[in-house]
Amino acid sequence: MFEDRKDAGQRLARALKEYKDKNVLVLGIPRGGVEVGYYVASALHADFSMVISRKLPLPDDPEAGFGAIAEDGSTFLIERAAGWVAEEEIETIKEAQRREIARRIRILRKGRPLPDLKGRTVILVDDGIAMGATMRVAIMLCRGKKAKEVMVAVPVASPDIADEMREITNRFIALETPAFFRAVAQVYRHWQDVPDAEVLAIMDRWDKKNSEAQP
């Protein structure tokens, strides 16, 4: 059980200590992954930013999804779920998520481009993985941008998703893989949604810390 995302990020950083001062790039997935990623990147003395990927929600059950899309257009569809959605409706949903991705880049990343990933070791961080679709498209994006190694590090994932992630990454770390996995929130003592304002505060704190560290 993690107290909160800060506790989870600090524990995750300890599991990644071999990457300290190795010029890795940590990319958090908004919104919860940005808070976890901040503490990972801080402990590893890594570069830090965010990569935007969004679930494609089912029309009748927005909490569930039939796939995901990333900011570069990388798309993953869960065939058994997407088969229940009409093709024209899939395109409508994808367009809505593209607009939300553009909004998050403009607001949360302040319009900054994604850092150059070519030749770098990238550690993708979220506060947990349930379905895995948003992480899959983030991995696809990193591969498409020629990252040298793509790692995924999360506090919790289901056992099945953990197995899948090991097959498509250079390395996968999950601190917890509960046999009876229901939701990411089950391993957090204190859990709440992370609003845009909190993500902005985290990134402002990162920018300030790095500007003060400059000689």
Image: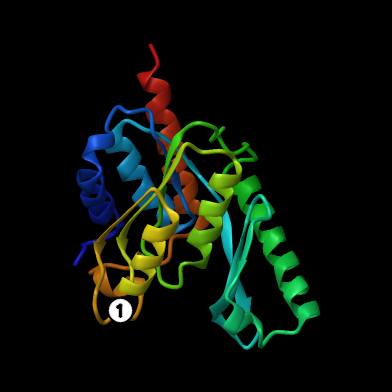
Q: Is residue 108 visible?
A: no
User: Residue 70 at x, y = what percent?
Assistant: 61, 56
Camera-side residue of 38 and 131: 131
Q: Which residue is mark 1?
A: 181
Amino acid found under the numbered disc labelled 1: Phe
Mark 1 surroundings: few (<14), some (14-19) or many (≥20) residues within 10 A: some
In the rendered image of this protein, does residue 126 appear above or below residue 215? below
Question: On the rendered image, what quadrant is the N terminus found in?
Answer: bottom left
Q: Which quadrant holds the C terminus?
A: top left
Which residue lies at the image location 25% right of the left edge and 43% below the top edge? 16
Q: Residue furthest right?
A: 88
Where is residue 143? Give x, y as percent.
55, 46
Image location of residue 101, percent across then percent down: 65, 56
Q: Is residue 66 visible?
A: yes
Considering the numbered disc 1 on the image, is that residue within a helix, a strand or a loop? loop
Residue depicted at 75% across the width and 65% down the height = 95
Q: How many marks?
A: 1
Q: Residue at x 36, y 44 (%)?
A: 38
Among the 4 quarters of the image, the one containing residue 22? top left
Closer to us: 115 or 200: 115
Is 135 or 113 nearer to us in this picture? 135
